[in-house]
Image: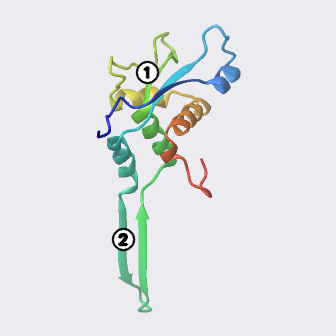
Amino acid sequence: MPIRLDVPLEKEYMLEETDKTFGVSDSEPTRVTIRQATQGEHERRAALFSQVIREMARDSSQDDIVRLIQRFSFEELKRIEVQLTMKGCNIVGPDGKLLFKYNADGKMGEHAFKEAWDVLPPSVASEIHDKVLDLNVDWRPTSGEES
C-alpha cells in the first residue's frame, strides 16, 4: 500500500520567554501554532539561496579574478520560514485586535504577514522562529552556523 499524505504535523507552542519578558499572566499565555513545511515550502525557502552571481575578469596584472555575489539576509530567512509554517498566533496588536489574521485554512497573505511581523520586538520574532525550527528540523542550522 502506498503512503497516504495526511495534513502536515502541527504543534501549538507557548512563548514562555515572551510572556516572562512582557509580564503576561498565566491565565492566557501567548501561543503560536506551527506546522511542518511541505516540499513547496522547502522550495520557496531555498529560493533565497538561489541568486548567486559569478563574475570572471582579468585585472591589469593579468591575474584572473573570480567574484561571487550572493544576496542573503538571515532576518529575511527567519521571516519567510515563520510565514511558511505559522498558522495561528494570539498576539494582539496595538489596536486590540489579533496581529496575525489567518483565514480558515491557516493562511495569511505575504504583505499582511510582513506588516504584522515588522512590528514585533526582535526577541518575540526570535522565539517564534525557534519554535519553527523545533518542528522543522531540516531547517535547523548545521554545526558551525549561527542561529
Vertical comparison of 138 with 3: above or below: below
**Which of the labelled discs sits on residue 20, or is there none?**
none
* Image quadrant where residue 62 sits: bottom left
* Image quadrant where residue 31 sits: top right
Vertical comparison of 131 with 18: above or below: below
Point 48% across, 11% down: residue: 95
Point 69% across, 16% down: residue: 23
Residue extending farthest to the left is 2
Q: Evaluate if marks 1 and 2 touch, with contact meaning CB atoms under 8 Å apart.
A: no
Instruction: Please tell me which of labels 1 and 2 falls first in the chain.
Output: 2
Dot 2, how many residues are within 10 Å of its Cα: few (below 14), some (14-19), or many (20+)? few
Residue extending farthest to the bottom is 62
Q: Position of residue 25 (x, y in %)?
A: 67, 11
**Which of the labelled discs sits on residue 54, or is there none?**
2
- Determine whether the residue tagged by mark 1 lies in a helix, strand or loop: loop
Q: Position of residue 4 (x, y in %)?
A: 31, 34
Vertical comparison of 90 with 78: above or below: above
* Image quadrant where residue 87 sits: top left
Q: Position of residue 119 (x, y in %)?
A: 50, 27
Quadrant the N terminus occupies: top left
Q: Which residue is mark 1?
A: 100
Q: Position of residue 98 (x, y in %)?
A: 46, 14
- Determine whether the residue tagged by mark 2 lies in a helix, strand or loop: strand
Q: Amino acid at mark 1?
A: Phe
